[in-house]
Image (cartoon, grey):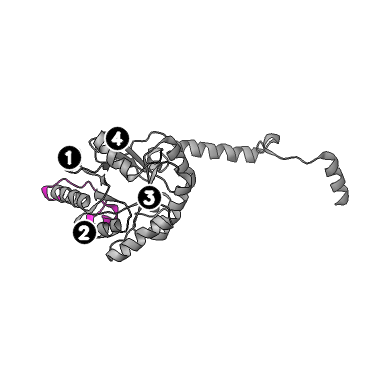
């Protein structure tokens, strides 16, 4: 069944937990979609996971569109959400709408995601007015890493908790269909979940959220530059991949691969005639 933004809204009212993962290419999107996740985020985390950047700030609109198109070709049922990268929605409402539109029209996404609360409410309203669904993002917002002074838990002070709750209500009022809540204490996440009618998707925000999202490469143990505390590694594919590659290297160097099973043949009589010519 094709998942939609309405499906996300209904899931909360029905008490159904939502599942989301990231994907940045056709093959991974096809796999996580077949596994049955509700949504795929083409996150600006691709800057670190796929492109080797230190953070997300170098990711461009063109990067997101390129990867989202690949994901859209691999996914049949999941809701595809494209991250709006740094500076793609900060200059003006008009530019925000234009960039969001490109992600839908060129990237074939179903929705876009923006970081921030009150400061982006006007942009969200404008994008939604252009008939583009929006997912919000509160708590630790990676595009603000330089303002935060690093990747830190957000919501440990009275001021921070108030700002998150206020932001969540503003995002709901602006028309967002759901909110990602990142690196927020469990108790605070539960308060936010209960204060709004749209689903809260947690990443490092505890079990109280209406759903969860992880970076797929973290979940599968493929990305080893660092592992956040909130990540559960369900598989350890790094070791499997390295082991498989080493077996391949050994087989090639020893002459075991390719063997007849993995090779093609030509008709013997025809080949004898060809050899006479050359």
Q: Secondary structure at mark 2?
A: helix
Q: Between residue 87 and residue 1, name the one nearer to us.
A: 1
Task: Decide whether residue 149 is among the magenta residues.
Answer: yes
Q: Secondary structure at mark 4?
A: loop
Tell me the residue that label 2 is attached to.
119
* Residue at (12% x, 50% y) in the render: 159
Instruction: Find the distance from the CA under tag 1 to the CA under tag 3.
Output: 26 Å
Mark 3 near mark 2, Cβ–Cβ under 8 Å?
A: no
Which of discs 3 and 2 lies nearer the camera? The answer is: 3
Q: Which residue is mark 4?
A: 17
Instruction: Determine the CA span between mark 3 and mark 2.
Output: 23 Å
**Disc 4 and disc 2: Cα gap in Å?**
29 Å
User: Could you tell which of marks 1 and 3 lies nearer the N-terminus?
Assistant: 3
- Disc 3 designates what residue? 110
Q: Which residues are magenta?
A: 141-160
Could you say whether the residue bearing mark 1 is in a helix, strand or loop?
helix
């Amino acid at each position: 069944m094709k998942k939609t933004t309405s499906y996300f809204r209904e899931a909360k009212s029905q008490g159904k937990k939502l599942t989301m993962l990231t994907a940045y290419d056709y093959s991974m999107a096809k796999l996580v979609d077949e596994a049955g996740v509700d949504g795929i985020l083409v996150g600006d985390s691709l800057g670190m996971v796929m492109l080797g950047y230190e953070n997300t700030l170098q990711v461009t609109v063109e990067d997101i569109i390129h990867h989202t198109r690949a994901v859209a070709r691999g996914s049949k049922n999941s809701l595809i959400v494209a991250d709006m990268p740094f500076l793609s929605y900060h200059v003006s409402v008009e530019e925000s709408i234009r960039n969001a539109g490109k992600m839908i029209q060129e990237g074939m996404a179903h929705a876009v995601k923006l970081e921030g609360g009150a400061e982006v409410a006007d942009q969200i309203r404008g994008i939604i007015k252009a008939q583009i669904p929006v997912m919000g993002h509160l708590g630790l917002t990676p595009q603000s890493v330089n303002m935060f002074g690093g990747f830190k838990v957000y919501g440990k002070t009275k001021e921070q908790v108030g700002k998150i709750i206020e932001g969540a209500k503003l995002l709901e009022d602006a028309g967002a269909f759901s909110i990602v809540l990142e690196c927020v204490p469990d108790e605070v996440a539960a308060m936010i979940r209960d204060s709004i009618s749209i689903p809260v998707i947690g990443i490092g925000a505890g079990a109280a959220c209406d759903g969860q999202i992880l970076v797929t490469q973290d979940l599968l143990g493929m990305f080893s530059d660092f592992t956040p505390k909130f990540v559960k590694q369900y598989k350890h594919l790094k070791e499997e991949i390295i082991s498989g590659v080493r077996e391949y290297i050994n087989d090639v160097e020893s002459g075991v691969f390719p063997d007849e099973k993995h090779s093609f043949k030509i008709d013997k009589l025809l080949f004898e005639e060809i050899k006479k010519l050359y």
